[in-house]
Amino acid sequence: MIKLELIVPVQAEQCIALLKRMPKGHPVRPIVEKDLRIWLKGYYGELNVGYHLSFLPEEEYYIFHGLRLKDKMAFQMDLLLVSAKFALIIEVKNISGKLIFKKGSDLMTRELNNVEEGMDNPIQQVKRHHLQFNNWLKVHQFKGIPVEHLVVISKTSTIIETTPDNIQIFEKLIYAESLIDKIKELEMKYTKPRITKKIISDLSDTLLKEHEIFLPDVLQKYTISQSDIRTGVQCPNCDVFYMKYLSANWYCSRCKFTSKTAHLPAIKDYFLIISQTLKRKQLAEYLHIDLIKARNLLLSLKLPSTGTKRSTKYYLPKNCILSPLNENDMKKGEFFT
Ligand SMILES: [Zn+2]
């Protein structure tokens, strides 16, 4: 049973929002485009692994995608599976080329088109998550659940290479195709239930309650000035900025398209790029509308908020979904390459 759905990583959404709203010739664009490709690649890898997990018996496994918890430091697990017998943390890697693992190294080397590149060793990474998750379980008083970890390579076209004295890594490093067999192996290792259904359900509720998506400050990360970010509502039909708000409809003066919902992606972009809080006045300036319209739009969205009247601050919903991305938005990333 999927308890936390796989979503497009918020960092990819931030890159897409930036590419939409940054001037065409901005010097940072190529970096944002590169990052977007990396985030989307990771997402498609996880989608593939999710497909393999769909063969597991629904009622036995609780599946969490992208759970981000706090131990002393925050950690995000690509996948967490919880059953009555064990929990399994999975780090998914969707990397092209050849991956070379050296014994005991915190780095792995990726070879692609005769270029070598050092990358974090995902086995070490998932081991750290394992320790952090064990601590988290202890702090939240969930006892008796054995925890396992794995790195899953999402594509069989990725070549893995290591030295003969290091082949034990294949205990923890597998291809997505072998994932179900590996889980069956773990079922043979842990035959008896360790926790009751009630505890699994409590654990699941606590995990979801403690899950917190991290929104990096992208203007700072890419050193982009806020004045480089286009304001206003983009026409969903012809992509032009900006639509006018006339009698509760967004109107494009270029292609004459009208929409009742075109402000949703714009408001989401505001949260993703500019600030994690939004006030009525800021929205009015950003969407080029008056304060009363801004207030009405904000009220209609039913966003989480704090404060009252004019000083009310609004926030993105906890899952960061205000208007879901469609396939087309994601492919736009490719158009920028
Ligand atoms: Zn238009």
Image (cartoon, rainbow, N blue to C red):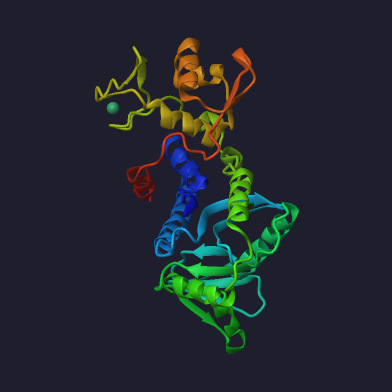
Q: Is 158 positioned to the left or the right of 107 in the image? A: left
Q: Nearer the viewer, residue 179 or 28?
A: 179
Q: Height in image: 199 above or below 326? A: below
> Which residue lies at the image location 45% right of the left edge and 17% below the top edge?
288
Q: Camera-side residue: 173 or 32?
A: 173
Q: 276 and 84: which one is in front?
A: 84
Q: Residue 245: tell me if it is visible.
A: yes
| Whether residue 314 is situated above or below residue 220 in the rendered picture | above
User: In this view of the protein, can residue 112 be seen by the observer?
Assistant: no
Q: Residue at x 48, y 10 (%)?
A: 292
Q: For residue 88, which quarter of the picture? A: bottom right
Q: In which quarter of the image is ligand 1?
A: top left
Residue 83 percent location from the top left of the image: 55, 62
Q: Residue drawn at (40%, 65%), measured in percent from left and top?
A: 55
Above/below status of 331 relative to 20? below
The x and y percentages for residue 22 are 46, 36
x and y, in percent, of residue 317 in the image: 53, 34
- How far across and how far down the image is residue 328, in percent? 32, 44
Q: Quadrant of residue 154?
A: bottom left
